[in-house]
Image: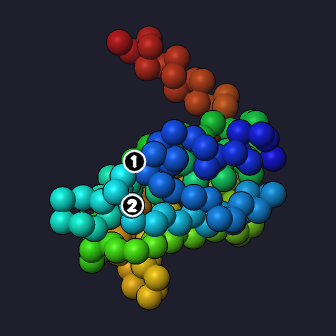
Amino acid sequence: MSWRLRHLGWWPPLLGAGVKVTRMDKDLRAVDAEMRLTRWNRNYMGVHFGGSLFTMTDPFYMLMLATNLGGEYVVWDKAASIRYRKPGVGRVRAEYRLSEERLAEIRATVEVEGRYDARFDVKIKDEAGDVVAEVERVIYCAKKNVHEERKKARVVGQ
């Protein structure tokens, strides 16, 4: 694991929101993050600012896929949406898991179609285990050669 990944908690957007990485397996198949309610991430109503909750989910699945798929793949965050379920107070947590089965599914689809938009659902939970927010992350995965061909076709078509 690179120095950058080991020190991901010092990345300014996460640091500023108060997001702490509490678990990061060496193979980057499991990551846990948490965030305490502070004056820096509290909104007008005194609960977690929605942007901080959203930030809490930002880099993880993209980094996990890029690391586990390897250098022959292009991996980008493509889209995300959030649905708030209840006000977040206290400490909130999110878990990110990437199974071998899911990786195999992504590789197989990319092999057949050349690209794949992998969808991941993240549940942000409070200390009681209640869901505060649900976030869907969409991660674009493609073989580098297919990605480069598509990129050239876009330039020619302009």
Q: Is residue 6 left or right of residue 10?
A: right
Tag of residue 38: 2
Amino acid found under the numbered disc labelled 1:
Ala
Q: Secondary structure at mark 2?
A: loop
Q: Earlier in the sequence, mark 1 or mark 2?
A: 2
Of tags 1 and 2, which is closer to the observer? 2
Picture quadrant where residue 85 is located: bottom left
| Left or right side of 100 for 80 | left
Secondary structure at badge 1 equals: strand
Q: CA distance from mark 1 to mark 2?
A: 28 Å
- Give the x, y percent position of residue 47: 28, 68
Q: Which class describes the residues within 10 Å of circle 2: few (<14), some (14-19), or many (20+)? A: some
Q: Is residue 23 above or below residue 5?
A: below
Q: Position of residue 89 (x, y in %)?
A: 34, 74
Looking at the image, the residue that sits furthest to the left is: 45
- Residue 155 falls in image quadrant: top left
Whole-percent x, y for residue 96 in the image: 59, 66
Can the viewer see residue 81 in this picture? Answer: no
Q: Is residue 152 above or below residue 63?
A: above
Residue on which the image places disc 1: 79
